[in-house]
Amino acid sequence: MRFSTQPIHEQEASEDIARIYQSIKNTLGLAYVPMMFKYLAHYQPFLENLWDSINKNIQDPSFKAVLGYIDGDIRNAGHTLFRASSSHDTLITLLPDHVIRQRISEEIRDFFVLQCKLAYVCVAIRQAIKGWAVGAKYLESEQAFHAMNESHASGLDDEIRNIMLVESTSALAVSSDLQNPLLTFLVLLNEEFANVTRTETYVLARVQVEKALDTRVQDMPHPIRASYNDVATLVKNHDELPYLFYLLSEKFPVVHAVSSLMWGYGMGMLGDRGIEG
């Protein structure tokens, strides 16, 4: 059985998908479309319904207030990781200019907030489709569903870091004098965070982030329209449902939760006072 495993990039999008992409970019204030939506674009009616629900929340003033709490929770988790490493000293050796480090910190702060926002939305979606695992058992493609779960486990951490690097380098349009220092920082962040993920401290930080996100879902201004019935109704090819439920319940909640933690860790490396406070 063949699944739609490749994202639909903007230059490949149909007119309807391009319209949704533009709305996503406008609402999030981005020049690009986050990878999650490019994967979901294979299911256009569902993506449109889901984005309308997400957009309604993000446009609600109370969403920003809740996001502020999540931002703080994830910063604290990032601070925990940062205190357990010596990455700041390494960064100072590579980038001794304090002004340059401060400028990089300012450039990545919005991207950190974006990852917190996407992590929050993804966890809300995951909770909205609580019946996904039960429903998957009734599908003929159950075997393929389990195969995908087994195949993704070993390489997911690498994939998360790769997605982060691809999206960050395409999102951060910086002046020419900051390009090389920013690249130096991104490479170091990638390497240092890979080392941190092998520690017990990282496990505790991940639990802290997940708990914070789960706790705040009840404060989402409007319910996310992503129940099992919503998905099954809007996705006509039910053979695709196991893969879609995997994206919604496993892959992207993890990708964005870990990515937000990674950026929180990176801001700690840069000496961001928001984390230290």
Image (cartoon, grey):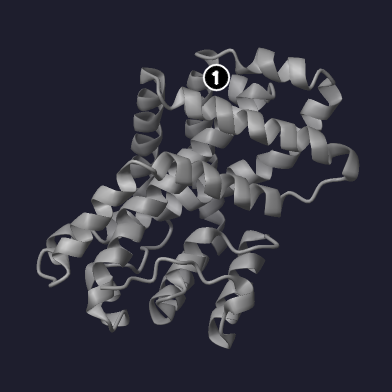
Residue tagged 1? 82
Q: Is residue 79 left or right of residue 176?
A: left
Q: Identify which residue, 125 or 244, lies in the foreground.
A: 244
Residue 27 visible in the snapshot: yes
Q: Is residue 265 above or below residue 226?
A: above
Residue 241 x %, y %? 26, 71
Q: Secondary structure at mark 1?
A: helix
Residue 28 x %, y %? 62, 60
User: Which class describes the residues within 10 Å of circle 1: few (<14), some (14-19), or many (20+)?
Assistant: many
Q: Is residue 104 above or below residue 124?
A: above
Q: Quadrant of residue 254?
A: top left
Q: Residue at x 64, y 46 (%)?
A: 111
Residue at the farthest left position = 138
Q: Quadrant of residue 228?
A: bottom left
Q: Residue at x 43, y 75 (%)?
A: 42
Q: Identify which residue, 97 or 194, lies in the foreground.
A: 194
> Looking at numbered disc 1 in the image, what kind of residue is underneath it?
Phe
Q: Is residue 23 left or right of residue 105?
A: left
Residue 69 visible in the snapshot: no
Q: Is residue 148 above or below residue 96?
A: below
Q: Quadrant of the N terminus?
A: bottom left
